[in-house]
Image (cartoon, rainbow, N blue to C red):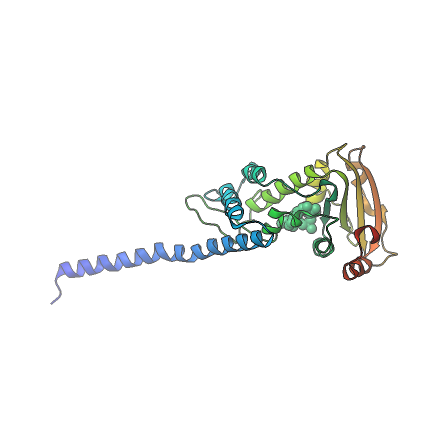
Amino acid sequence: MVSKKAVAIGGAVTVGVVMVAVVVVPLVLLTPRTAQFRATFMKRCEAYGETSHICEKTLATFQQAYVGKKHCDFSEGNYDQLFAETPFKHPCGKTMFWSKTKDLVHEFTKKRDCFVTLEDTLLGSVLDGLEWCGKEGNRETYTQQCQKCQPNPVSSFWKTASTRFTQHACDEASVMLDGERKEPYNSNSFFGGVEVPNLQPYKVTRLAVVLVTKESWGRTCESLGSLRNNLHRSIDCTCRAVARSHVEQCIKDYTPCGACW
Ligand code: N1C
């Protein structure tokens, strides 16, 4: 016969097991996500050419910005320490911006060292295409549904990165825009809203626009709308309309930068 006490203990054990399952299952599910993010960060950082020691240190500072914090109302200032510890090292006169031409511009810059995009820098190359956020009360990195509210850790990162990348620029900066769009220059994009206003007058002398069109007789530089008005008057603006097929041919032929447009 089973005593009442044994039934009570059995019940307590069952409740205990259920509670452990409830508590442990999310941890088991979450931890690999954090580990996966960490592995991707380290792999990309080391592929960039940094030592594992530098990568560990950069990852730790990066995580301090969002781990344990709620992902809504996220402050851009949270990344100040990260950018202070990871200054841009590329030549300031090789800055290349882009808007809605991400794949083409990177195909072009990856084989050449005459232009540098944000994704060609350490933090940009490590975090490009990733999603991350934290949660109050734990040390996890979440990699889904982080961008439901503004500003969030991802949008704040790109805003801070774009601002600082722009402030680093000097002499002639370039931008590749999509000439097939109604507004190749959109003042609400990162390029229009964050980069153009942060170009440093007198440090940057010219913005060279490369307007990528479907065919060489496509739209011309007149479609740039308010870009010229939004630039500081000391910054000159030039524009070349270039057919996409021509840029693709330059990529294939390893044409030196200066010879493509
Ligand atoms: O809004 P956009 O383009 O005009 O922003 C592009 C502009 C570039 O010149 C970059 O320097 O802003 C910088 N930038 C990135 O480097 C970047 N990498 C990845 C801005 N955003 C970046 N992303 C992601 O793409 C980010 O999540 C953001 O929302 C998009 C912006 O792409 P877009 O609209 O084509």
Identified at 70% across, 55% down, the residue is: 110
Residue 57 location in percent, x, y? 51, 44
Residue 219 location in percent, x, y? 85, 52
**Residue 246 position by quadrant:** bottom right
Left or right: residue 89 compared with residue 245? left
Left or right: residue 253 compared with residue 6? right
Residue 141 location in percent, x, y? 48, 50
Q: In what quadrant of the picture does the N terminus appear?
A: bottom left
Residue 229 location in percent, x, y? 80, 37
Position of 220 relative to 75 (above/below) = below
Q: Nearer the viewer, residue 73 or 208?
A: 208
Q: Nearer the viewer, residue 110 or 16?
A: 110
User: Is residue 12 in view?
Assistant: yes
Position of 178 relative to 64 (above/below) = below
Count up the numbered dots. 0
Identified at 57% across, 46% down, the residue is: 154
User: Is residue 179 in view?
Assistant: no
Q: Nearer the viewer, residue 121 or 20?
A: 121
Left or right: residue 20 compared with residue 69? left
Identified at 71% across, 47% down, the residue is: 116
Left or right: residue 69 compared with residue 16? right
Q: Residue furthest right?
A: 217
Position of 134 relative to 11 (above/below) = above
